[in-house]
Amino acid sequence: MTGSSGEVISYLRDKRKFIITSHEKPDGDALGSSLALKRILIANGYEAVLVDFSPLAPRYHFMIEEGEINDCPTYDTLGADAFIVVDCGDNTRVGRTAAKLLDKFPVVNIDHHGSNSGFGEVDWINPDASSAGEMVYELCREWGLDIPPSAAEPLWVAISTDTGDFSFSNTNSRVMRIAADLLDLGAQPSHVRRNIQENMRYEELMMTKLCLDRLVVCDDMPVAYITLTEADFKQYNCGPQDLHEPIDLARSIKGVCVAVLAYENPGENRVKVSLRSYPPYDSSDLCTQFGGGGHPRAAGCSFYDTTVSAALPQVLEKIRLLFFNTEHIA
Ligand SMILES: [Mn+2]
């Protein structure tokens, strides 16, 4: 662990105004932990705004109030005592607006990615935490801040999404105690499930179908991969934010130890690669080789100015060398 909740608290306690952001294309933990932190700070007499939470997948819209994701052009005049970045492994992963603000304010970096680059003025990096949501919860409890009911559900979303609904290897008794407290504070799991898992557009489900069509299981190593082109997204009027973890389907195949999802990010000239793995294979180690990072079981990296069909062989080759110690014999 780098830094501590205590250091963050002593740094923030006497300040008043905060900007909060997370990584681009926020997932449940990124949005949930940031939104909860904002609502907790406001409920306790501080000022806080969220910047750069778009594009936000429609399934998360139920969590936010109108105007709460402050995506307006007044950032140039925005004042703050600190810029809190949560669940973001590297400062290059924040959104475009947030990137412009990083140099302007002292950054407090709260994260659970072991590969975190430590880009903050104050860093608290705890790879043992299940989620940034867990860290925000701990921070606020230790600080002695009230957690209002409106923050309980975002924290539930944060922790439940990053723990695979409390079933991944990062689930432990501490996580379950926090979850129990969040229920007491008013979080409603069935409400969350109805909105996030059971609220899919038809086109999103068709994207999942397409992902299964594109699924390939390697015959020379226990690896499965899914590739998507920009045209695939266009076909169903979807973006990467509309994917429902198809990589988990690849990883769920008997005998598969490493799953890869590689897609062309529409309009960005970028191929995004996600990895999931079972021990002893370390996804973060592999993605670090391509300038990315993440967690041992889940990580990602990007390739620029290329296509998915050009990027994928590089990833597979690296997997072969690093994990299975063999070179490809074509
Ligand atoms: Mn997270």
Image: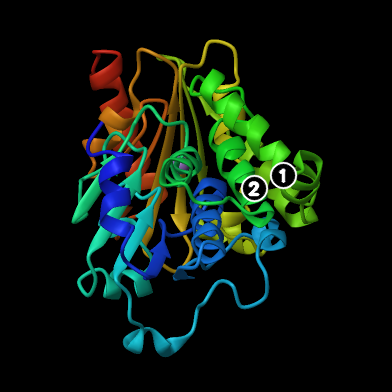
Could you tell me if residue 171 is visible in this image? Answer: no
Find disc 1 in the rendering and name its residue: 187
Find disc 2 in the rendering and name its residue: 152
Residue 312 coordinates in the image, percent (x, y)? 37, 39
* Disc 2 secondary structure class: helix
Instruction: Measure the C-alpha gap from mark 2 to mark 1.
Output: 5 Å
Q: Which is nearer the N-term, disc 2 or disc 1?
A: 2
In the drawing, does residue 101 fall left or right of residue 205? left
Question: Disc 1 marks which amino acid?
Answer: Ala
Q: Residue at x 35, y 60 (%)?
A: 84
In the drawing, does residue 253 fall left or right of residue 87? right
**Up-down relation of residue 231 to residue 156 (above or below):** below
In the drawing, does residue 235 fall left or right of residue 202? left
Q: Residues within 10 Å of mark 1 (few under 14, many from 20)?
A: many
**Considering depth in this image, is 155 or 69 the residue closer to the camera?**
155
Could you tell me if residue 107 is visible in this image? Answer: yes
Question: Disc 2 marks which amino acid?
Answer: Ala
Residue 284 coordinates in the image, percent (x, y)? 31, 31
User: Which colouring convention does the figure follow?
Assistant: rainbow
* Disc 1 secondary structure class: loop
**Up-down relation of residue 33 to residue 252 (above or below):** below
Q: Residue at x 56, y 51 (%)?
A: 146
Image quarter where ligand 1 lies:
top left
**Considering depth in this image, is 65 or 45 the residue closer to the camera?**
45
Quarter containing the N terminus: top left
**CB-based contact (under 8 Å), mark 2 and mark 1:** yes
Residue 115 — which label?
Answer: none
Q: Residues within 10 Å of mark 2 (few under 14, many from 20)?
A: many
